[in-house]
Amino acid sequence: MNGGALVLHGGSVQTRSNDTEFRFRPDSDFYYLTGLVEPGAVFVFRPGHDPESTLFVRPRDAEAEVWSGRRKGPQGVVDEGRAEQAFDVAQLKQELPRLLEGASTVYIPLGRARSVERSVLSAVQLLRRRNRDGQRAPESLTHVEALLGPERLVKDEAAIEDLRRAVEISSLAHMDAMRFCRPDRFEYEIEAIMDCRFRMAGSTGPGYTSIVGGGDNATILHYVENSSRLQGGDLLLIDAGCEWEQFTGDITRTFPVNGTFSGAQRELYQLVLAANVAAIEQCRVGASINGIHRDCVARLAQGLLDLGLLQGSLDEIIENKQYRRYYMHRTSHWLGADVHDVGPYTVDQVDVPLAPGHALTIEPGLYVAAGDTEAPAAFRGIGIRIEDDVLVREDGPEVLSHAVPKAIDELEAIVGSADAITFG
Ligand code: GLY
Ligand code: MN
Ligand code: MN
């Protein structure tokens, strides 16, 4: 940190409506460094100082705790080893100048926690005024992502275990959904089965809002209403993953509601599957997310030409981005505590090379809008995405989501194979 200090906010309870609230989830950076789940807390880290770590938390308050839950209080978080010293959060303004004095820069989550920004700016201003007494104010603020992005990008063994568990439970839920699926069920019933699996396994629930889209709902990338009745003859696209210790799975599968692919569905599916398999194979040390995406685009574009969905030369289609009519998102993102995890994709305009401990998704898809009258009729209203979670290892890619079927024959065998799902 080159003599810098770091100030993070633990996150706030968010209002759902009037006076009811969402379940609290801590800020990912804050949790990464402290392991503490405590709304309104502030963490200050100053390597090389004594003490290095300070937490500000709500004080114990018997009456408030009856209404809104237990608190650890300053002594409690020190006893747990979350920081070397702790104060009542009401003392933040008073203590912060002393903690930031002489720091070269202050790393903060710029734009993400206004109250912390204001506290830091006030402390910096005060230190500038006290310069007459020899105190030194930090000279810059730096986005914490510059520090923790590259750090969180490389998963250590503990993080890998948590991510593995998140993907494992997510995988079970996808298989439940496949077994339970049949015509006339509603999308929300499938979602409910998955939610049940997540919670019964001890997860806090989905790491992002589940997408359960039958038929042409699958062509809406962020479809989350999940309210339609499933029709035999349609495909169902499910993009869902659960959270485990703040890490989330992010898996998509697409399969026929009645267990049998039609000819056009099969052709499009095979194309996406081949792109998925080829891209996973490329998740090797030294490759890059942009390079994998370029190759994936070329494969999908060639397939779209072969199927008559696009016309012209491959080079033109890629150059003019015509493939974007059917493939409008990217192939990969970093995966971790945030589903679209932090971590740079390029540094000084050079692609970040994949390295051991990087986790990313591979998620090619093709989406033909129902109203796309230029597309051959058989393909209209079909949306397909196949998304796996991949860990880069020294000796090649490890597909964390390997257990979830994606070959056509495997899908046709599993879909609709259970009348009820039991949760043990
Ligand atoms: N579920 C969000 C994504 O696949 O990126
Ligand atoms: Mn996804
Ligand atoms: Mn994804």
Image: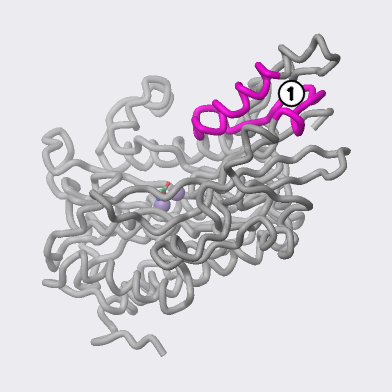
Residue 343 as seen in the image, left or right of residue 221: right
| Residues shaded magenta | 97-126
- The picture places residue 123, in percent across and down from the top left corner, at 66, 24
Q: Is residue 416 above or below residue 206?
A: below
The one of 383 and 23 positioned closer to us in this rendering: 23
Quarter of the figure with residue 264: bottom left
The quarter of the picture where the N terminus appears is: top right
Residue at disc 1, secondary structure: strand
Is 106 part of what is drawn in magenta?
Answer: yes
Q: Quadrant of residue 411?
A: bottom left
Query: Could you tell me which quadrant the C terminus lies in?
Result: bottom left
In the image: residue 128, left or right of residue 346? right
Q: Residue 123 lies in magenta, yes or no?
A: yes
Asked whether residue 284 appears in the rendered view, the answer is no
Identify which residue is drawn at 34% across, 88% down: 422
Badge 1 amino acid: Thr
Question: Residue 156: x, y in percent?
Answer: 73, 56
Residue 336 horizontal/vertical position (percent):
57, 52
Residue name at image x 47 percent, y 42 percent: 331
Judging by the rendered image, the residue that carries numbered circle 1 is 105
Q: Residue at x 44, y 55 (%)?
A: 387
